[in-house]
C-alpha cells in the first residue's frame, strides 16, 4: 500500500529540547516537503527536497532543519523548539512530473511548552 | 509569487442543500489547482485536481470544480451536501519556478470550515 508515514503522531515537549519528526514514503517519489498548519493560515511549506542531498527553504524555514540522505526519508529537526512552533506538521511527497500533486502523511501534532 | 484566497472562513449549510466554496488564485501562467479536504483530526485527502483541458473537473464524494481563467477562480461545488461532508476544505495552487520547473510545492488558501446542519 502506498503511504507516507510520520512519527511521532503526537508530541509534547519543552522549550529548547531538540526533537526530530520522521517522515518515510514507499512510493519512490522524488519530491518531499514539510508543511505546518496553523488556524486561519492554511498550510505553509517549511522545507522541501527535490531528491537525495538536495533541499531548499520553503516559506517558513526559521527554526527548522532537514536532511535527505535516503530517497524514502525526510526528517524534520527542531534544534531548539520554541512555543511558536506549536503546530500540526505534515510531510508530503510528490512524483517528478506530476504537476505538484502531493500525497500527505497523517500529521504530527506538536506542542512546545 | 503565487497566492490563493478562500474568502469564506466558515460556511454553514443544511443537509441536502447545494454547496459552493470559493477559491481565487494569483498565478502568472496556467495553474495546477487542487482541492483537499481535512476531516476533524485527520490528514488531507485530495478531492480533485485541474491540470489542463476540460475546465469542469469531477472529483470524489460527488464534488466538482470549475476552472475559470477570466475570473482566476476554481470554485468547489456539490449539489447536495451530506452530514459527513462537514470538514475543512483547502484550495491550493501548484508552484513552479521562473523556468516552469515544478518542485513539488503547493501554496494553500486559508481554508473554509464547512458545518452541516441536519
Image: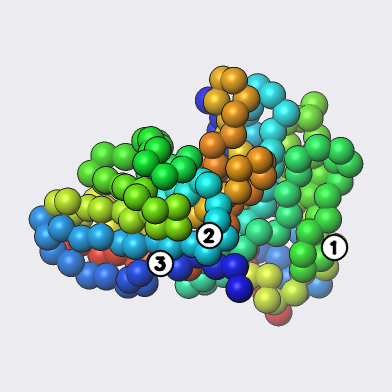
| Percent of width and height locating residue A27 | 57, 60
Residue ranking furthest to the bottom: B118
The x, y position of residue B52, in whole percent, is 81, 37
Identity of the residue drawn at 68% across and 70% down: B85
Residue B97, how many percent across, how many down?
Answer: 55, 25
Cα distance in 3D space between marks 3 and 2: 10 Å
Q: Look at 37% across and 41% down and name the residue there.
A: A53
| For discs 1 and 3, the disc positioned in front in the rendered view | 3
The disc placed on residue A104 is 2
Residue B79 is labelled as 1
The chain letter for the residue carrying disc 1 is: B
| Callout 1: SS | loop
Read off the residue under disc 3.
A6
In this orientation, does residue B48 appear? Answer: yes
Specify the quadrant that holds the C terminus of chain B. Answer: bottom right
Q: Is residue A11 above or below residue B95?
A: below
| In the image, residue B13 above or below residue A59 | below
Task: Name which residue lies at 81% across and 65% down.
Answer: B62
Side of B83 relative to B105 (left or right): right
Q: Residue at x 62, y 25 (%)?
A: B100
Amino acid at each position: 500500500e502506498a503511504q507516507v508515514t510520520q512519527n511521532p503522531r503526537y508530541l509534547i515537549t519543552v522549550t529548547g529540547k531538540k526533537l526530530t519528526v520522521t517522515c518515510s514514503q514507499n512510493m519512490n517519489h522524488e519530491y518531499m516537503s514539510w508543511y505546518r498548519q496553523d488556524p486561519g493560515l492554511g498550510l505553509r511549506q517549511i522545507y522541501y527536497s527535490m531528491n537525495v542531498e538536495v533541499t531548499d527553504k520553503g516559506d517558513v524555514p526559521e527554526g527548522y532543519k532537514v536532511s535527505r540522505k535516503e530517497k524514502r526519508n525526510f526528517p524534520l529537526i527542531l534544534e531548539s523548539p520554541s512555543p511558536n512552533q506549536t503546530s500540526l506538521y505534515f510531510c508530503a511527497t510528490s512524483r517528478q512530473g506530476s504537476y505538484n500533486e502531493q500525497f500527505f502523511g497523517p500529521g504530527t501534532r506538536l506542542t512546545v511548552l | 509569487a503565487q497566492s490563493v484566497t478562500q474568502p469564506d472562513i466558515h460556511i454553514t449549510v443544511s443537509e441536502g442543500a447545494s454547496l459552493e466554496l470559493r477559491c481565487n488564485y494569483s498565478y502568472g501562467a496556467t495553474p495546477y489547482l487542487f482541492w483537499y479536504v481535512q476531516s476533524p483530526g485527520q490528514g488531507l485527502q485530495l478531492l480533485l485536481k485541474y491540470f489542463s483541458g476540460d475546465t469542469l473537473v469531477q472529483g470524489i464524494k460527488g464534488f466538482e470544480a470549475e476552472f475559470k481563467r477570466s475570473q482566476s477562480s476554481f470554485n468547489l461545488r456539490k449539489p447536495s451536501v451530506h452530514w459527513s461532508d462537514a470538514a475543512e476544505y483547502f484550495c491550493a495552487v501548484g508552484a513552479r519556478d521562473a523556468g516552469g520547473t515544478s518542485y513539488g510545492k503547493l501554496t494553500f488558501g486559508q481554508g473554509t470550515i464547512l458545518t452541516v446542519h441536519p
